[in-house]
């Protein structure tokens, strides 16, 4: 049982984590911390948190578990501001979509607390955001990847793993670097492509007409381009290296395809399309 | 009232066209033509067609309207085989996703029938295919683009327009070239990107692991990569020029983005993402 849980950033992820642990009976008191008074008030009204503060030191003082659910670009400042007030036994975890940058921030800002730090990434989300969008079942049957670092103690890893399992999540563990490579491929690159495609079309003349003739496939394909731009700027910047490599690799594939088209090599096109369909049908629709 | 309607290719599009016109009371007899006996039999059982033949000349003989719903790669051969048996008054239209190539085929194969030829493209479809998947409401409130050519008579254009309106479609008209440019952007390029992304990831080592951590966004983004590979090979080859230009343009944008990432220019990323989100929210979700 956690006596005091501090949620830093009470949005969809932070709020849902609190609700899930509450409904699993794993926590006594939840304190929320954030910048928006309106959001924190709403979180309190919805019973996500018991009380709130805008001050990070106040929030983490006396907390047994601290969950960081702020944008990646804010992680380091948040860690620096709360660091001096952390209890020596406090377990710290986060929900960031990139792990390398968070670990780098933690090494800089959490120094002696590193044994208690367990980076994690719940692969869950909706288009909605804020405390309004939080719900206890968000992580149920969703994969959560924990990426313990060298310093992480076995006990801290166990505690954080138990919390995610209590949220109903399916737990996976992998090295930080590997996490960032995999997510660059399956999440960050697709977001980049969707944003870039919509922006490219929007820049064409008669763009209203172009979008008018977009069918259902386009709507699905570009849904992720309606995601939060600032959050995705942070994610892309944080995973700069792996994402940059994926982007260059993919751009080269496209240039190759343009050449294939120019040569009229239908067989080559067919083999790419058929392999892709087989892979998607096998890996995605069967999951 | 159409006395005899010939449907060449009784799949999702061809079958639904017949069902929609039947339910609108616009047609007396429907004859189906195709290669698969099983599919034609099923179409007859489902009441989509009254009878069928594998012979194109037999199918179009005596027909007042001929609807070509075969893959783009088969259009020219089909036209050549039916050409001599066409009635002088027969109206010919099609459902191909690219119009330039169909018009080129028609100029070569339909010669004296060009005044009666009205190229059209219903922007409708599902992942399913074959007579099994056909339904009368497929075109309801969907956009259908007709792209009459210089030779198309006003009367033929009117007749085909009336048929699509009877199917419940929203009718649009534009030049052939413009259609192919617009569709390259909103449909053909996104399909190319989805196929290529899935194939690229499938080619990475540990690809099963990569797909395992794909979330809902990836599923939506790549849904179109489960489309029929041969059909899409035909579409891409048929719209080779416009699609090639779009691909090169897009690949250049990606190379630019990789550079932006390398320079750590977060502001530039944010402006692309924000413009894209605004455009998508404005043009797509509000449509």
Image (tube, coloured by chain):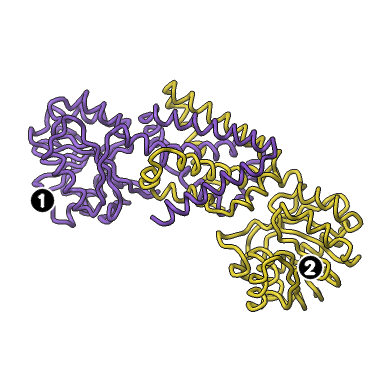
Chain colours: A purple, B yellow
Of B77 and A75, nearer the camera is B77
Residues at marks 1 and 2, CA–CA distance in whole angstroms? 77 Å
Residue depicted at 33% across the width and 48% down the height:
A124
Left or right placement of residue B113 versus residue B231 in this view:
right
In the orientation shown, which residue stands out farthest toward the top? B263
Q: Pointer 1: residues within 10 angstroms few (<14), some, or many (20+)?
A: few
* Residue tagged 2: B55
Q: Position of residue A190 (x, y in %)?
A: 46, 40
Looking at the rendered structure, the secondary structure element under dot 2 is loop
Which residue is the site of mark 1? Answer: A28
Q: Which mark is residue A36?
A: none
Q: Quadrant of the N terminus of chain B?
A: bottom right
Q: Is residue B176 above or below residue A116?
A: below
Q: Quadrant of residue B241?
A: top right
From the viewer's side, name the closer residue of A276 and A154.
A276
**Disc 1 + disc 2, Cβ < 8 Å:** no
Chain letter of disc 1 in the image? A
Q: Is residue B110 left or right of residue A43?
A: right
Q: Is residue A58 above or below residue B170?
A: above
Residue drawn at (75%, 74%) of the image: B30
Residue A147 locus on image (x, y percent): 24, 37
Neighbour tally class for label 2: few under 14, some 14-19, many 20 plus, Cα within 10 Å: some
Residue at screen point 15% across, 28% down:
A83
Q: Is residue A247 above or below residue A3?
A: above
Asked which secondary structure carries label 1, the reply is strand
């Amino acid at each position: 049982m956690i006596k005091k849980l501090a949620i830093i950033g009470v949005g969809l992820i932070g709020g849902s984590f609190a609700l899930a642990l509450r409904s699993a009976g794993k926590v006594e008191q939840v304190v929320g911390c954030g910048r928006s008074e309106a959001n924190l008030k709403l979180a309190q009204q919805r019973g996500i948190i018991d009380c709130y503060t805008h001050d990070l030191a106040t929030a983490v003082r006396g907390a047994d578990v601290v969950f960081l659910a702020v944008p990646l670009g804010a992680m380091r400042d948040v860690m620096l501001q709360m660091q001096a007030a952390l209890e020596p036994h406090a377990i710290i975890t986060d929900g960031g979509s990139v792990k390398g940058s968070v670990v780098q921030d933690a090494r800089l800002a959490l120094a002696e607390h590193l044994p208690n730090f367990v980076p994690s990434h719940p692969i869950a989300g909706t288009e909605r955001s804020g405390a309004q969008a939080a719900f206890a079942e968000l992580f149920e049957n969703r994969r959560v990847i924990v990426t313990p670092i060298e310093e992480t103690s076995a006990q801290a890893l166990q505690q954080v793993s138990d919390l995610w399992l209590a949220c109903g999540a399916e737990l996976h563990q992998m090295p930080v670097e590997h996490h960032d490579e995999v997510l660059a491929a399956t999440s960050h690159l697709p977001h980049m492509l969707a944003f870039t495609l919509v922006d490219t079309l929007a820049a064409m003349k008669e763009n209203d007409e172009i979008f008018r003739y977009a069918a259902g496939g386009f709507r699905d394909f570009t849904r992720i381009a309606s995601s939060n731009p600032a959050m995705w700027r942070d994610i892309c910047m944080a995973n700069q290296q792996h994402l940059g490599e994926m982007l260059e690799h993919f751009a080269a594939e496209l240039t190759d395809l343009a050449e294939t088209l120019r040569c009229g090599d239908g067989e080559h096109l067919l083999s790419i399309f058929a392999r892709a369909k087989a892979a998607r049908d096998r890996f995605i629709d069967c999951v």
